Image (cartoon, grey):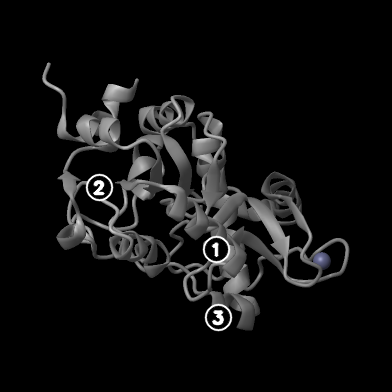
Amino acid sequence: MPQSALQEFVDQHRRLFVLTGAGCSVNSGIPDYRDADGAWKRAPPVTFQAFVAQAATRQRYWARSLIGWRRIGDARPNDAHRALARLEAIGKSEILLTQNVDGLHQAAGSAKVVDLHGRIDQVRCMGCDGVSPRKALQERLERINPDWLALEALVAPDGDADLDGVDFSTFAVPACPHCGGVLKPDVVFFGENVPRPRVEAAMRHLDESEAMLVVGSSLMVYSGFRFVEAAVRAGKPIAAVNLGRTRADALLTLKVEAPCEAALGFLL
Ligand SMILES: [Zn+2]
């Protein structure tokens, strides 16, 4: 079999800055946010501003999350995650920056990972900044909301679920057990900034890299796209694997329109 253009790209560059998105996790049962044209497939998720300002939004969020978490919590890595773990194992990966919050890269064995948008398996208190496992909160949510467990719904990539036409006003939202503060999933919401130290750490890795490899992202969200802009400014070549259009198509050295597992199969 002839060597693929992507394999050549990987062979040619010693240290890759890898940026991954939802396309990586589709085959793990976590659906993508956007269709091939980069448009929203469904209603956009909860914003940070609404989550902070409105108790009703938090009730709706945690009720949907109570249902959605079952699927996210059970997800397992697929061959795309395993191929990228292999890329690190052979010394090619400077860092893996992921826009996914599912933790599946780490589950597949990647250690050099920056979770750009946080981790859905953790909860952070907005009062005392304490971090606790999402699993423990799930047990509390289920204990104090037994009537809600029967609801089934579609699941979104952030562990959210569609529950249209439901009255959430009776849903009980637990507070931080230490300070009584508002609990928030430890993920960056839409309308919220990625913590600056996290961006700076990733940018330092980009400086150390020779090239960039984007896997399964349409790059529509600026928090990820800015690394493409920085790579272009630094004259680093960029390859992308994505089904459909990306915001960076005009900037790419190489574009591979294929499922992530198939495109990266040469690594396994
Ligand atoms: Zn607290």
Q: Is mark 1 within 8 Å of ligand 1?
A: no
Q: Which residue is mark 1?
A: 200
Q: Which residue is mark 3?
A: 49
| Amino acid type, label 1 | Glu
- The one nearer the camera, 99 or 127, is 99
Residue sitting at x 58%, y 52%: 120
Q: Which residue is mark 2?
A: 240
Secondary structure of the residue carrying numbered label 1: helix
Q: Is residue 251 left or right of residue 159?
A: left
Look at the picture and state if 173 lies above or below 12.
below
The residues tagged by marks 3 and 1 sit, at their Cα atoms, a distance apart of: 24 Å
- N-term mark: 2 or 3: 3
Q: Is residue 19 left or right of residue 122?
A: left
- The one nearer the camera, 263 or 233, is 233
**Residue 85 placement (x, y as % from top left):** 46, 30
Residue sitting at x 44%, y 55%: 207
Residue farthest toward the left in the current orientation of the protein: 2
| Amino acid type, label 2 | Ala
Residue farthest toward the bottom in the current orientation of the protein: 53
Look at the picture and state if 194 lies above or below 114.
below
Secondary structure of the residue carrying numbered label 2: strand
Frontmost of labels 3 and 1 is 1
Secondary structure of the residue carrying numbered label 3: helix
Residue sitting at x 16%, y 43%: 257
**Residue 83 placement (x, y as % from top left):** 38, 28
The residues tagged by marks 2 and 3 sit, at their Cα atoms, a distance apart of: 32 Å
The answer to whether residue 31 of the structure is visible from this angle is no
**Quick one: label 1, few (<14), some, or many (20+) residues within 10 Å?**
few
